[in-house]
Image (cartoon, rainbow, N blue to C red):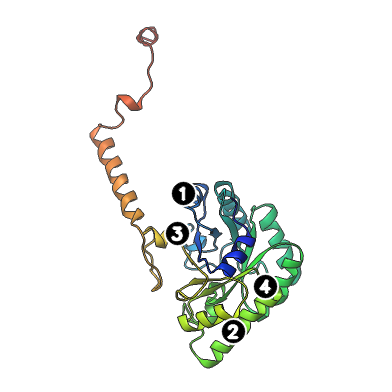
Amino acid sequence: MKKTVETFAKAKLSGEKLTMLTAYDYSTAKLIDAAGIDAILVGDSLGNVMLGYEDTLSVTVEDMIHHGAAVARGAKEALVVVDMPFMSYQTSVYDAVVNAGRLMKEGRAQAVKLEGGVEMADRIKAITDCGIPVMAHIGLTPQSINAFGGFKVQGKSEAQAKKFMEDAMAVQEAGAFAVTFECVPAKLADLATKKLAIPTIGIGAGAGCDGQVLVYADACGMFSDFTPKFVKRFGEAGAVITEAVKGYISEVKAGTYPQEQHTYKIDDEVIEKLY
């Protein structure tokens, strides 16, 4: 059955852990979906993983629409959540609603995700009031990386921890159906998870969250530019691909590929008439 925001709500009540991975294209989405993942995030991390940017700031709404629609075509059961990119919602409530609508209509999202807590509560409320499910994202918010001074763990000081808890309650009150906690101390994430009625999805936030999300290229060993502390490589697909490509190169250069079973036939009579 197709997973929905209701799936997330029921999982929170039953204590069942939720699973989420990123994907950015049709083929990868099909593979992840077939494995039984609960949700696929079309993250603005595609800026790093797919486009080679140093951060997520250059990703556009058009990028997210393009990749979101591709993933939606491949995901038959997983809930598809699409990130709202930098400056697509920060500028105004109006822009937030319009761009969320585009991601749903053109990008085929079933929910959108945006970064920020108290400061973005009015955007979350306005979007959800239009019938668009919103997943919030607090803690380390990569779109604010310049304000943070780098990729740093958030919530370690008393002031930061209080702000984190305020943000968590604010996004719930605004109507978010779930919230992502990124790079916060495990005990803080655990406390917030217990206080919230909506599911929490952790990434670098410990096992106390209601679910987890990772970038698929990290989890599958396909991205090596940098590896955050919270990443576990569950496979080495990158090495498998490299070896496959080496094998291809070797056989083509040796003339052993393609073989007869890889080719199409034609009657000799036809060929003889061409001489």
- Which comes before the other along the chain, label 3 or label 2? 2
Q: Residues within 10 Å of mark 4 (few under 14, many from 20)?
A: some
Q: Nearer the viewer, mark 3 or mark 2?
A: 2
Circles 4 and 1: CB atoms closer than 8 Å: no
Q: Eyeballing the image, is 149 above or below 236?
A: below
For mark 2, does the 10 Å Cα neighbourhood hold few (<14), some (14 to 19), or many (20 or more) residues?
many
Task: Tell me, for residue 90, which label it has, or none.
Answer: 4
| For discs 4 and 1, the disc positioned in front in the rendered view | 1
Three-letter code for the amino acid on which mark 2 is drawn? Met
Q: Earlier in the sequence, mark 4 or mark 2?
A: 4
Give the spatial CA distance, label 4 vs label 1: 34 Å
Residue drawn at the location 70% of the way across and 75% of the way down: 174
Relative to 260, does residue 8 appear above or below in the rendering? below
Residue 26 horizontal/vertical position (percent): 52, 47
Among the 4 quarters of the image, the one containing residue 269:
top left
**Mark number for residue 223?**
none
The residue carrying mark 3 is 216
Local secondary structure at mark 2: helix
- Closest to the observer: 235 or 241? 235
Q: Which residue is mark 1?
A: 31
Please identify the quarter of the rendering in which residue 79 is found: bottom right
